[in-house]
Amino acid sequence: MKELISFGPIHIYFFGVMIALGIIAGSIFAIKQAEKRGINEDTMLNLIMIVVVSGVIGARLFYILFYNPSYYFNNPSEIIKIDEGGLSIHGGIFAAILAGYIYSRKSKISFLKLADITVMALPLAQGIGRVGCDVFGKPMASIMPWAINYNGQVLHPAQVYEFVLDYILFVILWKRSYKKRFEGELFIIYLIAFPIIRGIVEFFRINPVVWGPFSISHILSLILIVIALIVYKVLLGRNRDIVEKLEVNEIKSSTLVVYLITLIAISVFVFYFVQG
């Protein structure tokens, strides 16, 4: 991992800083959106902490089980060393959904309402966090201007591909939140769109393949999409929840485009400045 600064035994890494910034930015956005929908700050803060912790645990467990189980079973002391990498975003999503559902039931708040708010902020947090990732993509067959030279190899900046697509999904969900047809619609869109994003980026990364060009991550993405389609069918098969109309004016598309371009520009600059 790219080290930014150290104080004796304390080391601060670029990836950790960007993950922290992503969590902070996503949390602030989620809290503001929740307040507009009648959910107080404490409720969202509790949910965010639960989702983050459970997401990390789930991401680690999925990586161990699906990517390199024999190594970790033979070296159990390595399981807790998440600072050395080894997290599966799919496992994080599964665990976060389960923990969020349990929290919503205990809090007696609509899970779908909380899920819609959370997934609006999630691509923003994921995109910012991905800026600091140093797991680069495959070597480029034809050198492109945006390639990155890493350890003497010219590689695809898979991180850039992913955070650009994450930011696009972020503004799409934000825009759609003003016109969603039923509670849970944003949740379903995310469960379908993010695995597609991850599947696209996976073609530029090096991961264990299971068939042809398709990797374990592609299989997990497909499972997530199937689950999303099943949930979508269930929601359509019952009476649609009444969607609360927001008191504020709908955000303009031009404003969202400005936000999108700004996010991409800043992230690209930071990525190439630090990683280049």
Image: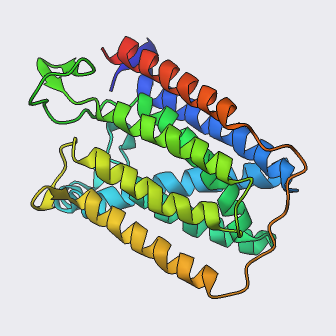
Q: Residue at x 71, y 46 (%)?
A: 30
Residue nearest the viewer, comparing 155 with 274: 155
**Residue at position x 22%, y 47% in the image:** 203
Q: Is residue 262 left or right of residue 40?
A: left
Quarter occupied by the C terminus: top left
Query: Can I make out residue 13 in this image?
Result: no
> Measured from the top left, where is residue 6 in percent x and y?
44, 14
Nearest to the observer: residue 183 or residue 1: 183
Q: Residue at x 60, y 55 (%)?
A: 51
Q: Quadrant of the N terminus?
A: top left
x, y percent for residue 158? 29, 35
Q: Let me know if residue 202 appears in the view.
A: yes
Q: Please identify the residue farthest to the right as the structure is shown.
A: 247
Residue 153 placement (x, y as % from top left): 12, 22
Vertical relation: 120 (above or below) 7:
below
Q: Is residue 110 above or below residue 253?
A: below
> Which one is nearer the viewer's eye here, 163 or 209?
163
Percent x, y of residue 74: 18, 59
Direction from residue 26 to residue 106 in the image, left or right:
right
Q: How is the image coloured?
A: rainbow
Q: For this rendering, which residue is in front, 56 or 123? A: 123
Give the quarter of the image for residue 188. bottom right
Q: Left of 176 or right of it: where is 106?
A: right
Looking at the image, how many numbered discs can be counted on the residues? 0
Residue pictured at 59% horizontal, 63% vertical: 187
Relative side of 134 to 256, left or right: left
